[in-house]
Each structure stands twice: as structure tokens, then as C-alpha cells.
Image (cartoon, rainbow, N blue to C red):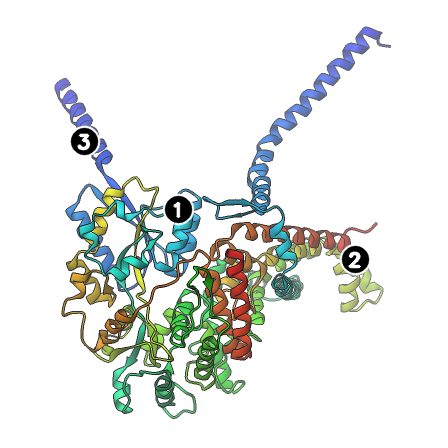
Amino acid sequence: MKQCKVLARAILILAFSLSFGLSLAQTTLRVMSSTIVESPEGEVEQAIADAFMAANPDITIEFIGTPMNDMFKVLTTNAIGGELPDIFTNTPEFVAQAADLGIAADLNEIFDEEFLSGFYPTTLEEATVDGQLLLLPWFTVPVGVLYRADWFEEAGLEGPQTWDDFVNAAQTITQDTDGDGQMDRWGFAMVGTKNGSGFFRFTHLLRSQGAWELYKDDEGNWQSDLGSEGMVNALRIYKELHDGGLVPPGVTETGYGEAVSLMASDKTAMMVTGPHTIGAILEQNPELEGNIHSVPVPMGTDRSASLGIGGFSIAETSENKEAAAEYLKFLVSTENMLEWNAVTGRMPAQIEAGDQPQISGPIYAGFVEAITIAKPMPQAAFYSQIQEVMGEAYQAVLVGGVSPEDAAAQAGEQAAAIIQDAQ
Amino acid sequence: MVSQPEELKSKVSSRTYIDKTQMAGLWFALPAALALLVVVAYPLLYGFYISLFETNLLNRWDFVWFKNYARIFTSADFLGTIFTTLKFTTGTVAGQFFIGLTLALLLNTKVPGRAFFRTILIVPWLFPEVVVALLWKWMFNPLYGLFNDVLLKLGVIAEPTSWLGSTETALPSVILVAIWKGYPLVMLLMLAGLQAIPQEQYESAEIDGASWWQSLWFVTLPNLRNVIMISLILNTVWWFKHFAIIWVLTQGGPITATSVISIDIYKTAFESFRFGPAAALAVVVFFIVFLISIGYQKLLGERQ
């Protein structure tokens, strides 16, 4: 009896020691991700993480899901509170701010050259600030136009190449299909909200008119074309689409999610967006498989596209940088990238995955072409203020009764004041 | 008669007893005082401290004295934001007061099902603000919303209206939601006040031939003065700095139609990452709200 008690105690002590030792060896990686909360992206990302954990039982991935439009606010708050995760979502729009805050580690010191040479050079350029690689590109979401190929075929239309084509197509498609006197199908799902989703889409229209919201001149000084003729033209196009009844009512309430639902529910024919939206639309309405095609953003005086890079940064304060690097390497492997693309539509930032036959055909044609003409996003810590000015300008034209000329003039003045303040 | 040394002893022991009593009181009050210092005084003082800098709160602290305040008071945008905030606050507080008082007066009578109505009318207050805002956002939806559906069928409107997307209707729509959310608190406060009014005063007024309106004006409202003051102060302060409902419904848009001061502070801090100017705005709001509460007290304070 006494021997049994001694044996039981010994087993307990051994079990406790083992579990304590294992917990010491266990690494938990906290990953703040915007895609984990989206569908179908979240399912794929979780599956990849599960596969990584199965292959690396000493590492646990713990996701902190944060919607993209809130990501950088939450991240900044966490940074101030000393609660940065090990890995966090980052994009070229925020990378300069991340550099300013000093929260992202230089990935040139974590990943070797051979690994990094497997990425499209343009993606690494956009991820670099002052020679430091601050985010590892995971996917690109080049912006183009998704359109209902079946409706276009019925109407004898082709994918719009210019903004005149775009407006004409929208006019043709916009109809009262059930004859009840109320319009129930519109040509364009315009994202008119004053947030990242709205800013991003308007930026491409603006640039197609030969105007840039923010750029550096030859002397390295920041400049803005928000007061230019290009801005006036961009605002005129938005006004024409809205006032012509070619967009559903409530344009300033239509964010990304609402626009996706409009496309999926057969309400709208076109949307300025990236290939990731294909997955979101098909998830809501699988019957649209094969009916969504793409073209680049229509041409104004210029061609416009951006890479729309999404990726991850490793926090400067992370104590698990090696484990984080292992996870990210696994995440961007060719096999996982192709699975990611197949389900979500987001395109690989990795060359080997991007060269696969899967990334071709009429669905991706517009986006593949967009990558070849993509221009980088400005890297300025005050970029969000310029975007806010842009958002107020297009909303003022859409619902505020302000003329494009007046809205552009005011936006130009505000942008100049912001730049002067920053410099 | 007590001799001098004994008198002295008595005074000393009294003083000792009084000191001990006072010290005991201080010790008992100390935890609450510390809590107030940590939770109230420290954030206020730290916020004021941040307002003197141009900072990202991490690695950049540029001391700019009162430049952030100078920018605020010379900015036309700030005045516009304050004006929008005052419109929102006035509309919300007035609407809640009118509806809350009316319902309280009704519930203070012997109406059938009074207990049921008292319960059901509190329901809006029980919902979290974000839930309330999301529910109403769907009801306001131009394509799928309840309001447009009903109004179209009744022929009141000819085509769908974007209630939250129009500069004319966005602010009234947001005020409507805020009134719906907040009237139960006013109703409860007024009801408690009404039930404390002595019935004899109404009987005297009836004997003197007072009408219902005269009873309301000369008996009910004067007796409710303190409750009204408390309700107005609390409500005005609460809704002046309100954020959640407006953010979920419109995010301050369209353009700046519903851009109240709290939205402005949030955007300055968390979208532009300019914490110094945001803190300065918050300090200014504190003083505005403080002045409003003093104004209420002077206007509605007890009269001899």
C-alpha cells in the first residue's frame, strides 16, 4: 500500500515535470490577421495554420482577427499599449507608418536572399522603406474591373477598355427587369463609403485621369494632384454614374461588403475591385461561377493599376522571430499559395506560384495585365489624411451638391496644407 | 467645577479623540480617493500632457506648447464640428426628454397593463449601442430596409431614399436612433420623481379648479425640477461626447454631415495617428461639457 502511494506520487511528479518542460518548449505565435475574419479566406488561412502546427507541434498559432478597415487603428493601439502580436497584417499603405512607429522588424535580417529572390521584385519594392524590408508579401490584389460576362454577352458588349465604354455599358445594363416601374438592376456597384475601401477604388479612377493623390517630385518634395484637372475629370465620372442612376441608391452607404452582395445578388454588373472579390461573390452565389470576368481599370489619359499587396510583418518586439519566419515561409510556399488562390482569388506574390497555369484565363486576365502596369502606393506617414480629403471630395460631389470643380479646388487646398504641415 | 489640570487633560483627550476620528475617516476615504485619482485625475492630466506634444505615443514626442490648441481655435472645421455636435445633442436630449416625460406621465396613471408597458418600454435601453445601431442601419437600408419598403408601399415616397447617405436626412436619422436608445433612462428618472410628488398637492390644485395643464405646469414640473436638472445634465454630457451609434451608422458621413466632435477626435487619433491634436480636442470638449453642466445648474438650480 505504501509502495503504491510512493509510485503514484512519482508518476504525478513525472507527469507534472513533463508538462512543465513541454510548456517551456512550446512557442505561441500571436498572429493579427485581417483575412482570418473574411470568408472564404479565413477557412483557408486556418487550414494552413493547422497544417503548420501539425508539422511543428512545438509551435501554436493563435489568431487575433481584425477587419482590414480597423486593422491599423487596433495595431497602433496595441503598439502604444506594448501588446504587439508576433506577426501582423501589413500593406504598402501602412508600411511607412509602421516604419515611423518602429514596430516592424527588418525582414532582410530574418530571411535570406535566396528565399526573397522568389518574390516579384515589384512586390518587395513596395514593401521596403529606407532600405528595410518591413513586410513579407503574401498575395497581390491588383485592381481591375469585375463584370458580368453573361449580361455583357446578352447586350452585345465587351469588357470596358475606356471610361466612356464603362459608362455606356452601365447605361445599357441598368434596367427595370421586372417592369414594376422600379429600377432593379444597375450597371455599377460603386463603393462610395469614406474609408479604405472607398479611397482605394477612387484612387485608381483618379490615376487613370493622369492625376496622383500623392507623389514625390524630382526634388523629393511631396506633391498632390487633388486640385488638378485630372481630379475634376475623375469626380465628373463619379457624378455622371451617380446622377445618371447607374448605381444603386445609397452610394455613400455602400461599402465593400455591400458592393459584393450587390454583385452576388444580381443587382449590379460591374465593380472596381481585385480578384479576391471573385471568391467572396461565388461564396454568396456559386451559380455565378464562370460568369465573372475581368479587365484592367478603364483607361482615361493613363492606365492605372496597383499591386494591392497584402502580407505580414514580424513585430520588432517579438521574442519569437525565428518561429514567425518559419510560419511565414510555410504560408507563402507554392502549394499553399495555389490553394489560397484557388479558393480566394487572391494572386500570388511568389514567382513560382504566379507562373502556374491556374493563374490564367478570362477570370484573371484583367488582373494579370494589371500587375504588368502597376504603380506603387506612396509611402508617407500622413497618407491617410490625404485619403480622407479625397473621400470628402467624392462624397461632396455624389451627395453634397458640390460641383467637381469646387470639390477639386477644396481638396487641392486641403492636401497642400497637409503636405506643408508634414514637411 | 473641573480643576485646571483636569480641564487640560479633558481638552487633550477630546482633541486626541477628534483627531483619531478624523484620521479614521480619512483612512476609510483613502481607497476611493486613490481610485478617483487613478481613474479620473490621472487620465485627465495625462491627456492634457499629451496635448502639448506632436506625438505618435511611441517614438516621437515633439513639444509644441499650445500649438495644437491654437490650431483648434483658428480652424473653421472645428466650429463646424461643434455646431454639428450641438445640433445632435440638442435634438437627442430634447427628443428623449419629451418622449421620456410623456411616457412617465402616462405610466404614472392607472392605465391597464401598466406593469407590462413599464417593462417593454425599457427594452431599447437594454440593448448594447452597437446592436441598436446595426438594427437601425438595416431598417434604413435603401434597397432592403423596412422603412423604404413600407413608405414605398404606402406611396409616401416614389423611390428608395438613402436615409443615412443623404446630407439632409443623415443627421435627423441618427438623432432618431439616439432618441430611441436613450428615452427609457429619462422615463425612469421622471417616473421616480413623479411618484415622490405628494398627492395632496394635486388634490389642492383640483380644489382650486386647476386644469390638467395647470397641474402639470404649477405642480408637476416644479416638483420635478431637480430630477429634470439631473436628467438634462447627464443626458447632455453623455450625448455630447457620444460615439458608437454615429460611428456604426455613418462614420461621420456623408461628407461631414454627422461628424460630431467624438468622431473627429477618433479619426485624428486613430486614422491620422496625430495623438497630440486629438488630446487637445478632448481637453477642449471637457471644458465645453463642464461649462454646459454649470449652465444647467444655474438655470435650473434650487430656488429659495
Q: What element carries label 1?
A: loop
- Residue B123 visible? The answer is no
Q: Name the residue under label 3.
A: A18
Q: Which of A146 and A248 is in front in this view?
A: A146
A403 above or below A383?
A: below
User: Of discs 1 and 3, which sits in the foreground?
Assistant: 1
Same subunit, tags 2 and 3: no
Mark toward the start of the polypeptide (1 vs 3) = 3
Mark carried by residue B201: 2
The three-letter code of the residue at mark 2 reads Gln
Chain at numbered mark 3: A
Q: Which is nearer the eye, A416 or A177?
A: A416
Judged left or right of residue B65, residue A28 is left
Residue at the location (68% across, 23% down)? Answer: B21
Answer above or below: position of A324 versus B162. Answer: above
What distance separates the C-alpha of mark 2 from that of mark 3? 79 Å
Horizontal and vertical percent for residue B288? 67, 54
Instruction: Kindly report the distance in space between the C-alpha atoms of the residues bearing marks 1 and 3.
Output: 39 Å
Residue depicted at 25% across the width and 85% down the height:
A150
Question: In the image shown, does A174 or A376 lie closer to the viewer?
Answer: A376
Quarter of the view holding residue B258: bottom right
The subunit letter for the residue under badge 1 reads A
**Alpha-carbon neighbours of circle 3 within 10 Å: few (<14), some, or many (≥20)?**
few
Quadrant in which the N terminus of chain B is drawn:
top right
Relative to A40, residue A85 above or below: above
Question: For mark 1, what is the residue?
Answer: A102
Look at 25% across and 78% down and name the residue there: A293
What kind of residue is marked 3? Leu
Residue farthest right in this picture = B1
The image shows residue A287 at horizontal and vertical percentages of 23, 78
